Amino acid sequence: MKTKLFSPLQIRDLTLKNRIALSPMLTYCADHGHLTDWHLAHYAKYAVGGVGLVFVESTKVDPRGCTTPNDLGLWKDDFIAPMARITSFVKAQGSAIGIQLGHSGRKARNSLPWEGRLPLGPEQKGVDHDEEWELIAPSAVAAGSKASVPREMSLQDIQDQIEMWGKAAVRADAAGFDVLEIHGAHGYLLHQFLSAAANQRKDQYGGSLQNRMRFAIEVAEQVRSVWPTGKPLFYRASAVDEAGLTVEDTVALCRALKIAGVDVIDCSTGGMSEHSIASGVTRPGYGYQVPYAEQVRRDAELLTMAVGLIIHADQAESILQKGQADLVAIGRELLHNPNWVLDAADKLDEENIFSNIAPNYGYWLEKRSSTGFKGKTSTRLNGIDVPPRAN
């Protein structure tokens, strides 16, 4: 049968071959902001595996905005050529490639997650050239009890950051990216401006929701002004958080972002606590953030990408069929199973299940299937809503 999950989606001039995206996930493998061979191997396997839109992880527009010393950067032209190597390979497999641009603000300068994700002190040198690593934020309010107090950004700092986002977008285009996503979620800089808990400013960037939205909107306007008209612009939002942000606030922001030229809202949650990004947000199980993508899609009249414990093929198909989102982003499940796309096509009885993957894999796997192995892969498990399939 023809499924929604494997139907193409056109956004501006870009047509995605399916509705499956690799969610942007930090891998903490950069060297002073530079790509390494790890990144090529990491992203290449998802393109070969048939993912429709491969997102490169949060890449920083300013070295001060790195979450850890091992974050990727796009704050200078030196980064363009190595990134072009990845974009060229991914697109040669028939996949689109996107990049998420971010700045961690007061949540920058931490150790690696497997080293405790602990705040590092001012003695930690910066990512670019061992410079001083200054924390900046909308207000001089620390991210947690153990974190350093950041410097409150001046109006000039704000304008400088907006320009940095624009310059990074120009570099992303030069590197060959098809899609750009602005990271405005998870307690990072744009989310900090939006949050009344983190933003205690008394000027035009603080106070009312309209004022707190201003920085995100101006960043989006700047990026859209330099990002090619035919290329889609995404925005990742925390639809709700632990510090009082409501989905109605997010809908108001997304309506304004739509006017600024944003095409798709990537709906996540949380990030304003000292704990995980989902801390304080109810997690009922599979697809726990999908209702937010559905409400933003309906009330802001924007395309949305759903993310968060989307595990099974039938679950992803149901989200799309119900009109809860237009794309599904798969994260850790793709880390666990890079062949998730192939498995999903098989489990949904998609026509020509090998058409999404690289032909030099598809040729051999189709021969394998024709010799009696169809539906008998090692990962052939039931979904969340379907009965066991007869052998």
Image: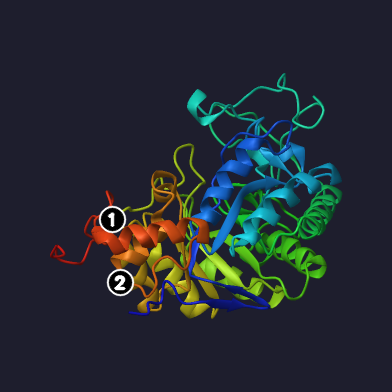
Q: Position of residue 204 (x, y in %)?
A: 75, 60
Which of label 1 and label 2 is nearer to you? Answer: 2
Name the quadrant of the N terminus.
bottom left
Work out whether residue 341 can be spotted: yes
Please tell me which residue lies in front, 324 or 332: 332
Give the vertical position of 280 relative to 64 (above or below): below
Report the disc number at residue 284: 1
Secondary element at tag 2: loop
Determine whether, in the image, residue 227 is placed left or right of residue 99.
right
Instruction: Report which quarter residue 166 is drawn in.
Output: bottom right
Name the quadrant of the C terminus.
bottom left
Residue at image point 42% right, 60% down: 341
Residue at image point 35% right, 71% down: 317
- What is the three-letter code of the residue carrying label 2? Asp
Which residue is the site of mark 2? Answer: 349
| Label 2 environment density (alpha carbons within 10 Å; few <14, some 14–19, many ≥20) | some
Q: Position of residue 113 (x, y in %)?
A: 51, 31
Give the vertical position of 356 relative to 80 (above or below): below
- What is the three-letter code of the residue carrying label 1? Pro
Residue at image point 36% right, 54% down: 309
